[in-house]
Image (cartoon, rainbow, N blue to C red):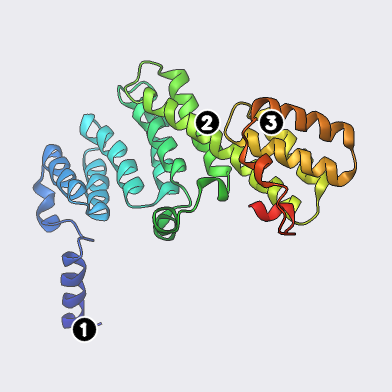
Amino acid sequence: MSRSVALFLLLLLSGCGLFPKELKDSKSWSASKYYSEAKTELNEGNYQAAIKLFEALEARYPYGRYAQQAQLEVAYAHYKDGEPATAIAAADRFIKLHPNHANVDYAYYLKGLANFNDDLGLMGIVSERILGQDMSERDPKASRESFENFKELVTRFPKSKYASDAVQRMKHLVNVVALNEVQVARYYMKRGGYVAAANRAQYALKEYPQTPATEEALFIMVKAYDALGITSLRDDADRVMRKNFPGSRFLSDSTGSDGEPWWRFW
């Protein structure tokens, strides 16, 4: 590579914020100077530049509060840069190295946030914000892991300033996972897998009671048992549904006169 091309690439990358500013003079920097420069990059949204500076800080000054805080900031920078797996790994590293740190509760919270937004990325954000994709339509693995992260935070640090938000997110995640179960049951119903649909809907009722998914889960059970000719179970599910959801949209719209299959309701 010619010197002119190398210089061009260096200027280009520096202009894009991929290389921390003034890094060539950083050998004389103190730990506080490294941290200040890294925070500036972080606050300006230059996450990769911030990460490089935080990592350089830890390498040059591996002990002390600045190095510890840098490890936590790296996890946050990766999270903001749309790298949930790397953010979680960095948070786990901080927890392992500093289990009694005053801010270790934030590391647990950050893990929950990273999993909470996992699978979004650029395309996920587009579908979530523009196309209106429901979280329940995505792989529930990250939602389950996020719930466990927040649960661990609330259990270990009930007085943490992040606990209240974590609890609210946990409530949302329970609804998301329950709706995912109903999504699967709905899938089986549309394809004539009535036994699988009934079992999945029943599982949602048992594992996630009193969630918004309950109404549709009961409806699927009614229709699945009806299709299977199991009238006793159908009537039991129908009775429970009518008692708990007397004005259900499913009940009012499931017997249309247009000749469409009942599942066209979805």
Counting from the top left corner in percent of width and height, residue 260 is at: 72, 59
Is residue 149 visible from the viewing direction of this image? no
Counting from the top left corner in percent of width and height, residue 258 is at: 71, 59
Element marked by disc 3: helix
Residue 243 in the image: above or below residue 79: above
Residue 42 in the image: above or below residue 24: above
What's the residue type where badge 1 is placed? Ser
- At a point 32% along the width and 48% down the height, the residue shown is 80
Is residue 259 visible from the viewing direction of this image? yes
Q: Earlier in the sequence, mark 2 or mark 3?
A: 2
* Horizontal arrangement in the rendering, residue 47 relative to residue 28 (left or right): right
Kindly report which numbered mark, 2 or 3, lies closer to the viewer in this rendering.
3
Find disc 1 in the rendering and name its residue: 2
Find disc 2 in the rendering and name its residue: 148
- At a point 76% along the width and 33% down the height, the residue shown is 238
Element marked by disc 1: loop
Kindly report which numbered mark, 1 or 3, lies closer to the viewer in this rendering.
3
Q: Which of marks 1 and 3 is nearer the N terminus?
A: 1
Find disc 3 in the rendering and name its residue: 205
- Determine the CA span between mark 2 and mark 3: 20 Å
What's the residue type where badge 3 is placed? Leu
Of residues 15 and 154, the one drawn nearer to the viewer in this rendering: 154
Of residues 122 and 76, the one drawn nearer to the viewer in this rendering: 122
**Dot 1 alpha-carbon crowd within 10 angstroms: few under 14, some 14 to 19, many 20 or more:** few
- Determine the CA span between mark 1 and mark 3: 67 Å
